[in-house]
Amino acid sequence: MAQLEFQPGFGPKVNCTCLQFEAGVCFAPGCFPCAKSCFANAPPELANSPGPLGTGLLCSSGCQPCCQAAADPNKAANSTCDLPVGGCS
């Protein structure tokens, strides 16, 4: 039986407002839980965040955040979730 796996870059591009993103209600289908190794040097509250699905913060590839500012020069090429140009704080 075929199984759908997390695939970075899978699905339509999603544009999130900061209000939606900060409430944890906006993310893209290609997002998946970040590996614990992504948070080796992060504060505990970030490393232990439940994220929007309760499985941890979401990534798009490697340790790249799932949602990134649309104009961020370091944005992952396969990111499918855009935040406003200035990003969210």
Image (cartoon, rainbow, N blue to C red):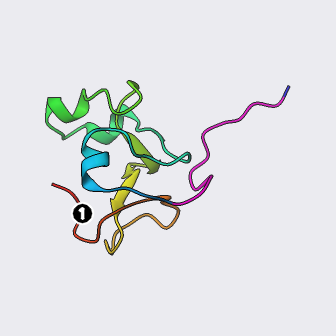
| Residue 80 horizontal/vertical position (percent) | 50, 58
| Residue 76 horizontal/vertical position (percent) | 43, 63
Q: Amino acid at mark 1?
A: Gly
In the picture of the structure, the residue carrying the numbered disc 1 is 87
Q: Which residue is more in the foreground, 61 or 86?
A: 86
Above or below, 30 relative to 15:
above
Q: Is residue 84 left or right of residue 5?
A: left
Q: Secondary structure at mark 1?
A: loop
Q: Is residue 8 left or right of residue 84?
A: right
Res 34 → quadrant: top left
Q: Quadrant of the C terminus?
A: bottom left
Q: Is residue 63 left or right of residue 41?
A: right
Res 15 → quadrant: bottom left
Q: Residue at x 31, y 26 (%)?
A: 50
Identify the residue at the far right of this view. 1
| Residue 31 horizontal/vertical position (percent) | 49, 45
Q: Residue at x 24, y 63 (%)?
A: 87
Q: Is residue 67 left or right of residue 60?
A: left
Above or below, 69 relative to 26:
below
Q: Is residue 20 magenta?
A: no
Q: Which residue is more in the foreground, 30 or 25?
A: 25
- Is the magenta region chiefly helix, strand or loop? loop
Q: Which residue is more in the foreground, 33 or 13?
A: 13
Q: Residue at x 41, y 35 (%)?
A: 35
Q: Is residue 4 magenta?
A: yes
Please state the extent of the stretch shown in magenta in the rendering.
2-13
Q: Quadrant of the N terminus?
A: top right
Circle 1 packing at 10 Å, graded few (<14), some (14-19), many (20+), is some
Above or below, 56 relative to 69:
above
Q: Residue at x 30, y 47 (%)?
A: 21
